[in-house]
Structure formats: structure tokens, C-alpha cells
Image (cartoon, rainbow, N blue to C red):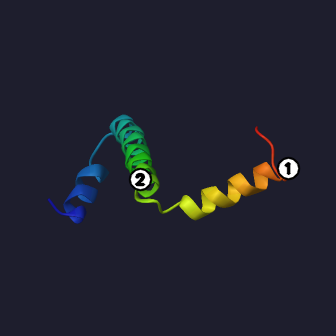
Amino acid sequence: MSISEIETAIIELPANEVKALLSWLTEYNSKLWDAQIEEDLDSGRFDSILAEVDKEYDSGLARPL
């Protein structure tokens, strides 16, 4: 199914079903985002940033929330 076909199908939905779809898409997108963050953490992509944060915290430039 193409995006164009999906868009056409969504236009034909009643408002309450569009609302439910939007809720589902929001939750699904959050799960994708969480998975991407985990993948980035596991790959070491944030290591230099996290090291900088630790350094600032250790030197007293930051404090826990």
C-alpha cells in the first residue's frame, strides 16, 4: 500500500477514528524514538557528550534535577 493510498483511506475515516489513529501513531512514533536512542547509546554515539556532562557535573557546573 502506498502513502497516497493510506492518505486517501485516512480522509475517508470518521473523525473519531482519525483521533484514535493519531493516538496510535503518536505512541508508535515514541517507541521508534526510544529504540533509536537505545541504538545510539549502545553504539557509543553519545559517549563524548556524556563524558562532557560527567566532567561538568564533577566540576560542580551542574547538579541533579
Q: Where residue 42 sits: x, y (%)?
A: 41, 53
Relative to 25, 62 lies left or right: right
Q: Where residue 50 sits: x, y (%)?
A: 61, 56
Q: CA distance from mark 2 to mark 1?
A: 27 Å
- Callout 2: helix, strand or loop? helix
Q: Quadrant of the C terminus?
A: top right
The three-letter code of the residue at mark 2 reads: Asp
Q: Where residue 58 sits: x, y (%)?
A: 78, 49
The three-letter code of the residue at mark 1 reads: Gly
Query: At x 18% / y 63%, what residue is drawn?
Result: 2
Is 48 situated above or below 31?
Answer: below
Relative to 15, 4 lies left or right: left
Q: Residues within 10 Å of mark 2 (few under 14, many from 20)?
A: few
Q: Quadrant of the N terminus?
A: bottom left
Relative to 17, 33 lies left or right: right
- Callout 1: helix, strand or loop? loop
In the image as oriented, which residue stretches furthest toward the right?
60
Is 3 situated above or below 18?
Answer: below
Q: Nearer the viewer, residue 21 or 38?
A: 38
Q: Nearer the viewer, residue 40 or 1?
A: 40
Give the mark nearest the N terminus, 2 or 1.
Answer: 2
Q: Which residue is mark 1?
A: 60
Q: Which residue is mark 2?
A: 42
Q: Nearer the viewer, residue 62 or 22?
A: 62
